Image (cartoon, rainbow, N blue to C red):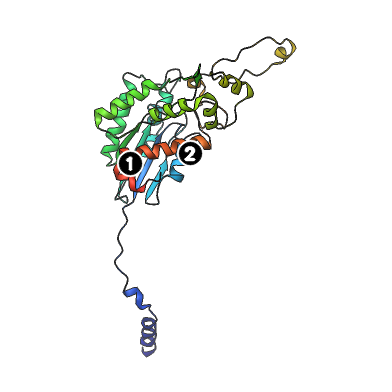
Amino acid sequence: MLLLLGCAAASQATVDPSVAERPPVTPIRASKIILVGDSTTAVQGGWGPSFCADHVASFLACVNLARGGRSTYNYRAEGSWDIALHEMRGDAYAGGVYVLIQFGHNDQPGKPGRSTDLATEFPENLRRYVREVRAAGAVPVLLTPLTRRQFKDGVLIDDLAPWADATRKVAAELDVPLVDLHARSVAAVQGMGPVQAMRFAQARPLPAQVTAAQAGTTIGAPPPMTVDAVAKPTPTRAVAQDNAAVEPMGTPKAAFDYTHLGREGADFFAATVADELARQVPALRRNLIP
């Protein structure tokens, strides 16, 4: 017994006296951002990775759940939205959970299993996402779709304008913060022109594509040469690439196109999103890095 008492006394004697003098610790107020959308937000081909890596402070968790080839319809139908709802549980995030939602590219016509009706289904899908985010106790933020980078005669082909307009209307109707990425990206890409905008792609364009862009009109890749074509060459003319039709269902490959983003494009538009988000959601401003 005496030995045990002696050991206890010795242990108390070695305690650092400064420990007892520590001031109370102030609990952190962490927040969380969840990214929901298609390949132009996703981890390969989108602005999301650069946003999460370079534009959020350590008190702002960032989870990218965007997936290539997804629309407002099949993102929910396949179960991806259920995962997002699970991530919205915010007991540990005293600063709130924010869900950034960007769709439009795959809601366009011509994509079996993906496309939605612009007049009715697309806006109603957005409304349902907003309602369920709020029901989960999180804050919805709608983003208009990132522009494609196709040109004709030096003018940007703004094929996503109707989906951007529909998103704006839902945001106004339901009083949802809006990041107008479409407007910002259209202005930026039109200002760069078809040649400079090629820098934002995942891979280098073909020489024929550069030549066409220098003349003001972007084109897709020329068709591959066949044995017959080599034996009997005939004049061919490259035609404009229809990105709405060729965008893949899954994760895009690192190939040149006018929709997906390489590192330079991702960095550029991630900064755009961070800037707009700080303007539209002031509560996040202190934890966003310009």
Tell whether label 2 touches label 1 (CB within 8 Å).
Answer: no
Q: Nearer the viewer, residue 128 or 224?
A: 224
Can you give x and y, in whole percent of width and height, for residue 276 in the image?
Answer: 36, 37
Q: Which residue is mark 1?
A: 98
Q: Is label 1 in a helix, a strand or a loop?
A: strand
Q: Nearer the viewer, residue 115 or 145?
A: 145
Q: Up-down: is 156 above or below 22?
A: above
> Residue 83, can we see it?
no
Q: Is residue 200 left or right of residue 96?
A: right
Cα distance between the residues tagged 1 and 2: 21 Å
Can you give x and y, in whole percent of width and height, for residue 18 in the image?
Answer: 35, 75
Which one is closest to the eye, mark 1 or mark 2? 2
Question: Which residue is rendered at x = 36% and y = 31% of the image?
Answer: 180
Q: Which residue is mark 2?
A: 267
Q: Nearer the viewer, residue 264 or 108?
A: 264
**Local crowd at mark 1 within 10 Å, few (<14), some, or many (≥20)?**
many
Q: Is residue 209 left or right of residue 148?
A: right
* Quarter holding residue 270: top left
Res 120 label: none
**Which quarter of the image is occupied by the N terminus?**
bottom left
**Local crowd at mark 2 within 10 Å, few (<14), some, or many (≥20)?**
many
Q: Is label 2 in a helix, a strand or a loop?
A: helix
Q: Nearer the viewer, residue 28 or 248?
A: 28
Can you give x and y, in whole percent of width and height, for residue 80 in the image?
Answer: 40, 35
* Quarter holding residue 171: top left
Question: Which residue is rendered at x = 36% and y = 81% of the image?
Answer: 12
The amino acid beneath tag 2 is Asp
Q: How many numbered marks, from 0 up? A: 2
